[in-house]
Image (spheres, rainbow, N blue to C red):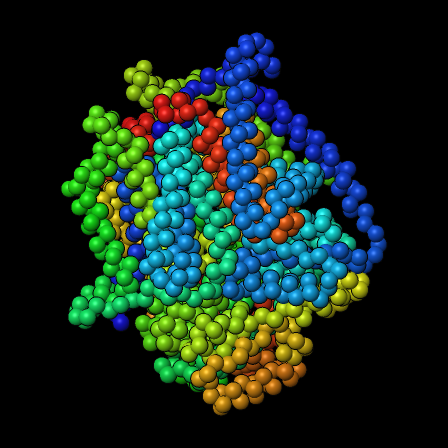
Amino acid sequence: MTQRRLVTTFVATSAVLALAACSSATSSTTSSSTAPGTGSKAVGFIFVGPKTDFGYNQAAYEGSQEVAKKFPNLKVLTQENVPEDDNAARAMEGMISRGAKIIFATSYGHLQAAEKVAKAHPDVVVVQQGNVIDGAVPANLGTYFGTVYEPVFLAGVAAGKATKSNKLGYIYAFPIPQTINNINAFELGAQSVNPEAKTYAVNTGSWCDPQKQKTAVDSLLSQQIDVVTQHQDCTSTIIQATEAAGADTVGYHADAQSLAPKGWLTGSQWAWAPLYDDIVQTALDGKFTGSKYNANYRVGFQNGENPFVQSAFGPTVSAETKSLIAEDLTKLKVQGSSVFTGPIKDQDGAVKIKDGDSLAYGSAGIEGMDWFVDGVVGKIAK
Amino acid sequence: MTATAEAPPTDPPTTPEPETGGSRLAGLGEVVLRWAGAIAGAIIIFAAILISKGTDPISVFTDTWSATLLNSYSVQQILIKAAPFALAALAVVVPSRAGLVNVGGEGQVIVGAIAAAGLDLAFGASLPGGLMLLVMLLGGVLAGAAWAGIAAVMRLTVSVNEAVSTLLLNYVALDLLLALIYQPWKDPLGSGQPASRPVEDAAKLPVFSGTSVHLGLLLVVAAAVAVWAVFRYTAWGYQLQAVGGNPEAARRAGLPVTRLLLTAMLVGGALAGLGGAIHLTGVEYQLRPGFASQVGYLGFLASWLARHKPGAVLLAATVLAALAVAGDSLQLDSGLPAATANILTGLILIAVLGWTGTRKKASSR
Amino acid sequence: MSLVVDVLSGAVRGGTSVMYGALGETVSEKAGVVNLGTEGCMLVGALAGFATASATGNPWLGVLIAAVGGGALAGIHAILVISRGANQFASGLTLLFFALGLTSLYGADYVGKEIHALNPIAIPGLSDIPFLGPILFHQDALTYLSYLTAPALWWIMASTRPGLLLRTAGERAEVLTVHGYRIATTRYAAVITGGALAGIGGAHLSIAYAQSWFENMIVGRGFIAVALVIFASWQPLRVMVGAYLFGAALALSPALQARGIGINQFALDVLPFLVTLLVLAFLGKRTLLSAPAELRRVFDNTAT
């Protein structure tokens, strides 16, 4: 075929397709006036990484499989490695064309695509995991998340009690607010039982780069840091390296006690199924609009079942530590309490949360946190 | 066996139908057979891999075919995805005609988008929409050209090979993107996530009414036609190909070889930069960490699939985009992992690269 | 531990994997074949090695199978470019996509698995040497092996018959034909050996260093290996230096942060690439002249 003919064919095809799309688009937007999510034949889940990452995405995937068990009449559609860009919108559209009227976009950066898809399909419920919708929330959209920093605070207590060098290590990917919440909560938890405890924060600039993770562990261990935790997507490299070096581990995303039988203290792990199930049920019942999920829903110890739960304790955690943590848990369940209760200073000594003030679930202070508390060593990565 | 581009096009005159000549018809038949055989081979191996994972290949193929190509939404998505691939591929085509290897599409696309986004951040509200869009696209063109220009200048002044320098510059561009969106350009309303603020509504590329396909697609086709016409009808295009064919002879014939090489690379970068700007203003609207990830590399492969012919590049880019979109169906309808799409793409590329050219021609180079 | 020791020991540990990849690329390029698919060979090696170690409990068998896997992928490259006349850059990139897909498809079962890994072994006596001990002699067996691999390659290339054949295939291929050798055979051997070395590099990451497998775990370091070869002007011993420089750049950021010193991560991440570009610019024509002649034909058909 000659150049010219190819070009012509290409243009002609585009034009025809554009016309075809025109007609179908108009028919699909005239949806019925029924509540979004009702009559769904399928539920869709998109994940930013592989389903098997021994971490964040795997936990969400496992949650989706629980939904499949709970709702045998619904087909559960999953798509992994969905980038945080317009490809995510395409993935969701594909699920909608396969009968899904309930969609979970499970990564922070999927929000823009979720907003776009929700706008195009008023009859589809789109919920996004972990980000925050700015301004008015459309009737078929919402975000949800656990208050991740609460169990991390409790794990910090265990770390503060366990450390002998008073140096804790925190390996993180990028300085997003969620991560900063965690690092600060970890340090505050440790400080609450061990005022000398410092948290050394090291970033890798990647959600899953095993080589950098290992290098970070080595650097921390060489500085006598004896408890290592993390906020990464894939978690096992750090845990195994820490265990091999004889230091203690605080897990994240998944229960990895089997990888660190000696040094495992505790950790935080996802148990998404109850929340996923409830969101699906609410949407199927036609009750999504106006529900708590039709907002920036943050569930923590105070208002229900936090999907981010504390992992089981390891063998070396003392009874005293366990009871301290149980006390803290009781306190955190009291309405109005907060991990971030003043006075809290930042690294430069400036008071960021005044005595008597505290940061509530979903508040701007938490969702936009961009400073480290006093006691965290290391500057926020730039 | 060199990185040389195809020799100056020896296309027959562009008559629509092959009129005469049994031998030409036979030649065409042979080409068709070769392509069919290669692609069939790739698909058979892919089917074997599917069977090894306990999946029925027939239903995978039928489901994927209908979900990907018989669905208007997904076809629109293929076209949208093909646009930056095609421009990144044209960015390989132009330098390759002069014998240069541009592996830097990835970085040139990114800097094109960075320039467009930066212009929007700086002047977004102060210019009328249409003009703003034009300025942004132009900015992308210039930035892409400048980025490729670094490699060209290094090549022409200190003899650093452009295949290597453009590859390295990809990483520099990506790092620049990350540095910008994690700090100075981070959207203040974006709840702390690393992304620039969306471009002004007026600076977004309009879409074909009722679709999600943006008008940038016309620019892509125009670019391909322009590249084709330049090589066919202009002195610059002719001289460029003379340099690509035999640089020594070209020099002796008094052609300005240095200037030709420089401009070839600049034009290549400009095309990729335009691709980045179009992808930003037509699809993504904001810079994010994975912006246009792998577009440059896939564009490079599209250019080779198309044997560096501008018209065929459009087709090759569309095929690669279709394979990427087919990955959706592989996951949703067949429950296969995301990676299967990469395997299929890899197999088809292996087959086409290795088994569609005439072997004699290949080994004589 | 002092910052310098910390960074340098991290440089050796972290640079080893990319060194194997770059040594493999050196062998391939010496024979006149560029393999941009080194990243893919490393990925295949990482998975093949990890899976074998996981299934058999024997990490050394894992290293062997990693070499076989990396070599096999490079073999496809060899077929495409040597026998089928495909473009080297396009073929290499293609193999990367192919390897990404294959390793992700077959690797999912190995995520989070534990293996008998190659742990660091302190060499008695040597590891007690101040400064050098912790940097060089408290490493894993594949790292020790790499101390020998680079000099051995240098010696093989400079002083042995296979080395001579290799260099001839890269410099004046037609001479091989005159002496009754087949150019293609020599090149096949070089490309496959290169892939096998890259496979071992991947295995170093999965079996010895990170001791785990994850999808796409090489994250671009195969491309750095390719750049290192040119940075090192095709000399194995310089490849070694380059790899350690890269390892040092990786190790510096966490080492500083673990001491509470803030650093701009993006400035640091871009350093290896800028340094390589600057070195290339500085060496200029000298790099080009030290390139194997056949390779110059691949790279520089319009040499100015």
The residue furthest right is A33
Residue at 55% of width from left, 72% of height from top? Answer: A269
Q: Picture coordinates of residue B135 (x, y %)?
A: 55, 38
Task: In this rendered view, identify the residue nearer to me: C131 or A355.
Answer: C131
In the orientation shown, which residue stands out farthest toward the left?
Answer: C159
Residue shown at the point (23%, 52%) measured from the top left: C149
Left or right: where does residue B202 sit relative to residue B271? Answer: right
Q: Residue pushed farthest top?
A: B20
A332 above or below A367? below
Examine the rendering and report whether any part of residue B148 can be seen.
no
| Left or right, B323 with reference to B171 | right
Of residues B133 and A69, the one drawn nearer to the viewer in this rendering? A69
Quarter of the figure that contains the N terminus of chain C: bottom left
Classify the position of the C terminus of chain C by image quarter: top left
Look at 35% across and 61% down and name the residue there. Answer: C59
Locate residue C195: give its quadrant: top left
Residue A53's spot in the image, x, y percent?
Answer: 51, 61
Q: Quick check: A66 above or below A248? A: above
Left or right, residue C255 beside residue B182: left
Judge whether residue C151 can be spotted in this image: yes
Question: Which residue occupies 44% across, 42% down?
Answer: C95
Q: Is residue B340 above or below residue A16?
A: below
